[in-house]
Amino acid sequence: MSAVPGVTGLGGEEARALEARHGIATYAQFPLTIVRGAGCWVWDADGRRLLDFYGGHAVALTGHCHPRVVASLRAQAGRLLFYSNAVSSDVRAAALRDLAGTAPAGMSRSFLCNSGAEANEAAIKMARRTSGRRKVVSLEGGFHGRTMGALSATHLGHYRSDYAPLVPDHVFAPFGDLDAVRALLDDDTASVMLEPIQSMGGMRTADATYLRGLRELCDEHGALLHFDEVQTGPGRTGAWWYGDHCGVAPDLISTAKGLGSGVPVGALLVADRVSEKIALGDQGTTFGGGMLASVAISATIAIIREEGLLENATRRGREIREGAGALPGVTGFRGRGLLLGIVLERPAKDVAAMLREKNVLTGATPGDPHVLRLLAPLVAGDAEVGAFLTALAEVLGA
Ligand SMILES: Cc1ncc(COP(=O)(O)O)c(C=O)c1O
């Protein structure tokens, strides 16, 4: 047993038994106890090394334990672990500045919180509060989180249907159908909310014409445009934010997951014309903008910028498409950059299980059983892309 409290050194089987005994089993787990990570690689308690193209659930954006993230956290942990928004903080100020440096023009403020669902809750509340309207239009197949507000905007599967009744005034349009959104917009519509790539929904990808059309419709009707970039941002698709690909600036961008490279964070980036209407007391959270979270945000942004990871996301995504496109049983691709769906003839769950046997972690999507979901760290290089393609070729019988 380790001398550091909490850093236990439990064996894999022992850990799984304890989790089963004392945890509440809300996740179907991979049969693995992961104890260490570096870059795109993780190790289980028995020393088995795996290539993590599941990216720790889309979180290990700069790779596991990027040395600069670890160094920032270590340095800050010895200074101050936490003080709330009741006081100013040097590192929170820097994180807010750094986030604003990635945002579209006219979006200079953010609300910091702890998760994707919390960022979406804040977005829904701010849209309603600043517009005085109630209705939120979101898309069929969308996933926005499991709290009651975020769930009310979620359409996908059992996440929603198991918990009725939900918050009223949430309505849905089919993905990609501008006329359907137009038909739902009225003078009580606060916002239109969507994931530019529906990751859980099968990696369905919005095109530029659709996103520009939504921007125009929102402007015509005085509704806010809200992109849920919990999976697409920051940087995963090869641009800081998805609208950068097509010149569309939304009014609200919610994000989380990779933003802290593994430290729990969430953020809502807000257009200035909206944030200027938000008053003291309109929203709050104890832990949002905490010191460890803040240094993790700044470190993540610096690494993406200085290590050219936007370009790398585009390049590695293209290489995976080129390599996998030549394999039998691959029928297409969805997504962008390193938020990538490989469409397979076979069920993706089976292929993911076979890849796991070959020490490669990937994901499936609840929205489309034939889409293998890749959430690889943006630091993936030749060795990692090569190892993935070799394993996939073996599994698909090439
Ligand atoms: C697009 C999207 N929005 C929101 C969420 C919820 O984020 P969190 O689990 O951090 O609350 C998720 C989580 O998978 C997501 O994929």
Image (cartoon, grey):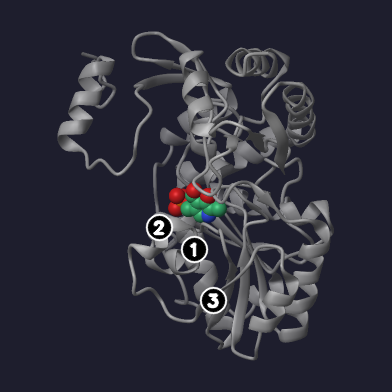
Q: CA distance from mark 1 to mark 2?
A: 8 Å
Identify the mark nearer the N-term, 1 or 3: 1
Location of residue 128 in the rendering, given as x and y in whole percent from the top left corner: 54, 81
Residue pointed to by mark 2? 159
Residue 327 appears in the figure: yes
Location of residue 45 in the rendering, given as x and y in whole percent from the top left corner: 34, 14
Q: CA distance from mark 1 to mark 3?
A: 10 Å
Residue pointed to by mark 1? 154
* Count of marks, rendered view: 3
Kind of residue at disc 2: Tyr
Kindly check if marks 2 and 3 are in contact, taking CB atoms under 8 A apart as contact. no
Identify the mark nearer the N-term, 2 or 3: 2
Helix, strand or loop for disc 2: helix
Kindly check if marks 1 and 2 are in contact, taking CB atoms under 8 A apart as contact. yes
Q: Is residue 319 above or below residue 310?
A: above
Decide: few, some or many residues near mark 3? Use Cα within 10 Å; few <14, some 14-19, many ≥20. some
Location of residue 125 in the rendering, given as x and y in whole percent from the top left corner: 50, 75
Residue 114 appears in the figure: no
